[in-house]
Image (tube, rainbow, N blue to C red):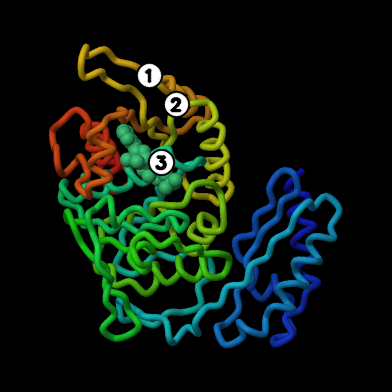
């Protein structure tokens, strides 16, 4: 049913002509991250060269209105994003870059792993930070891209402050701690100030972090995504070759329902699901040593079995994990070998032996 609607949306977009080239915007490759969700919610991005960004609003509006007029479409949202002309793009490897057709490998980066969650607050950033540090401790060259544009928390979690520099005014030099190279929108904004990144700005910011950051040679770039299934997730998967997604969930039904939606989105985008991690799985009482399951237990494993995707293990609910995140000392670094670090180390080892091998 959403397939039929998607066809209708595509047809409508072929009727919108780009006034500059005369080609329709779909064939011209200007439509990106098209998403047609159940209930008729449609969103997409229109990409124009940077010099046309200011004058492209009428085109955006025409495309949005054409889609909104389709029977079965409840809401339509088109956002504009501007890209720099190809010759201005930094080329960290030195070769010429032709117009990208589908998801592209990032120069010098062997693998990209996305860490996602359906719902906010389930520990996606905590898992990303500890996974990155654990992989670095296992000898991998690791980058961490904090794409959680609604609440970038990686600088705090990895104990990194200060601004990344850009000596040539074009390429951004990332910062490093615990053997992890980090770039985050949180490093671009003054600490404590909320930054609201929307639409084209948001997609542009993600693109900048992928294209303009001097990541250097990496075995793996971990991308800490915002929660849910929005433009950032879709743009990442459409533009960049992502080896797979790790989905983080708590055992609660409500988190698992959202995790399922996230998995569905990645599958539709053709991004492999590396597996589900159950965070805040069990709590061991300091006083009596008894194991409690405040959010239930085993839900993520059952969900993974049901969906036929790997189960990647359980992370306990533990004060040291929370404090490590708040204090910029991930538990994997501050308490290596501890039971609370074990789940992250096992996750890193499983990925190192699997997708990163
Ligand atoms: N296993 C855990 N044990 C104890 N505290 C945890 C654990 N996992 C995460 N937390 C804490 O829960 C809070 C939310 O975690 P985190 O920021 O990693 O979630 P998130 O899914 O990335 O959230 P958002 O997407 O909203 O940014 C943080 O204070 C973090 O320290």
Q: Badge 1 is on which residue? A: 293
SS of the residue at dot 3? strand
Work out how far the residue at label 1 is from the one at label 3, CA to CA, in angstroms.
Answer: 25 Å
Does mark 2's beta carbon lie closer than 8 Å to ligand 1? no
Badge 3 vs badge 2, beta-carbon distance below 8 Å? no
Give the residue displayed 34% in from the left and 16% down from the top.
Answer: 292
- Is residue 114 positioned above or below 33 on the image? above
**Which mark is drawn over residue 274?**
3
For label 2, the residue is: 251
Between 45 and 7, the one lying in front of the other is: 45
Q: How many marks?
A: 3
Seen as rendered, the residue at the extreme front is: 192
**Residue shown at 68%/47% (left/top)?**
37
Which badge, 1 or 3, is on the more N-terminal residue? 3
Q: Point out residue 224 in the picture as x, y percentages from the top left corner.
A: 39, 52
The quadrant where ligand 1 appears is top left
58 lies above or below 334:
below
**If you read the primary sequence from the N terminus, does the residue marked by circle 1 or circle 2 appear first?**
2
Tell me: 119 left or right of 135: right
Rendering quarter of residue 241: bottom left
Mark 3 closeness class: few <14, some 14–19, many ≥20 residues within 10 Å: many
The mark found on residue 259 in the picture is none
The quadrant in which residue 164 appears is bottom left
CB contact under 8 Å: marks 1 and 2: yes
Label 1: which secondary element: loop
Q: Nearer the viewer, mark 1 or mark 3?
A: 1
Q: Nearer the viewer, mark 3 or mark 2?
A: 2
Q: Nearer the viewer, mark 1 or mark 2?
A: 1
């Amino acid at each position: 049913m959403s397939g039929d609607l998607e066809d209708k949306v595509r047809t409508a977009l072929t009727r919108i002509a780009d006034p500059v080239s005369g080609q329709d915007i779909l064939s011209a490759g200007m439509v990106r991250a098209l998403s047609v969700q159940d209930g008729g919610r449609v969103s997409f991005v229109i990409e124009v060269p940077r010099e046309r960004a200011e004058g492209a609003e009428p085109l955006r509006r025409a495309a949005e209105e054409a889609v909104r007029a389709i029977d079965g479409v409840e809401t339509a949202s088109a956002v504009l994003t501007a890209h720099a002309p190809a010759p201005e793009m930094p080329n960290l490897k030195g070769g010429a870059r032709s117009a990208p057709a589908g998801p592209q490998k990032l120069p010098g980066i062997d693998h990209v792993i996305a860490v996602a969650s359906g719902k906010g607050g389930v520990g996606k950033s905590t898992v990303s930070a500890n996974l990155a540090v654990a992989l670095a401790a296992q000898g991998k060259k690791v980058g961490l891209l904090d794409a959680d544009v609604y609440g970038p928390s990686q600088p705090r979690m990895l104990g990194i402050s200060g601004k990344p520099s850009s000596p040539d005014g074009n390429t951004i030099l990332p910062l490093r701690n615990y053997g992890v190279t980090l770039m985050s929108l949180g490093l671009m904004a003054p600490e404590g100030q909320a930054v609201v990144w929307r639409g084209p700005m948001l997609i542009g910011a993600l693109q900048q972090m992928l294209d303009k950051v001097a990541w250097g040679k990496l075995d793996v770039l971990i991308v800490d995504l915002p929660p849910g299934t929005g433009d950032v997730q879709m743009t990442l998967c459409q533009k960049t070759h992502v080896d797979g997604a790790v989905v983080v969930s708590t055992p609660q039904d409500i988190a698992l329902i959202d995790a399922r939606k996230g998995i569905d989105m990645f599958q539709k985008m053709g991004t492999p699901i590396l597996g589900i991690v159950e965070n805040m799985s069990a709590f061991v009482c300091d006083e009596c040593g008894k194991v409690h399951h405040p959010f239930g237990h085993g839900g993520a494993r059952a969900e993974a079995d049901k969906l036929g995707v790997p189960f990647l293990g359980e992370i306990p609910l533990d004060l040291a994990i929370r404090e490590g995140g708040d204090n910029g000392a991930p538990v994997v670094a501050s308490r290596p070998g501890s039971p609370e670090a074990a789940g992250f180390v096992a996750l890193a080892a499983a990925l190192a032996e699997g997708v990163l091998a």
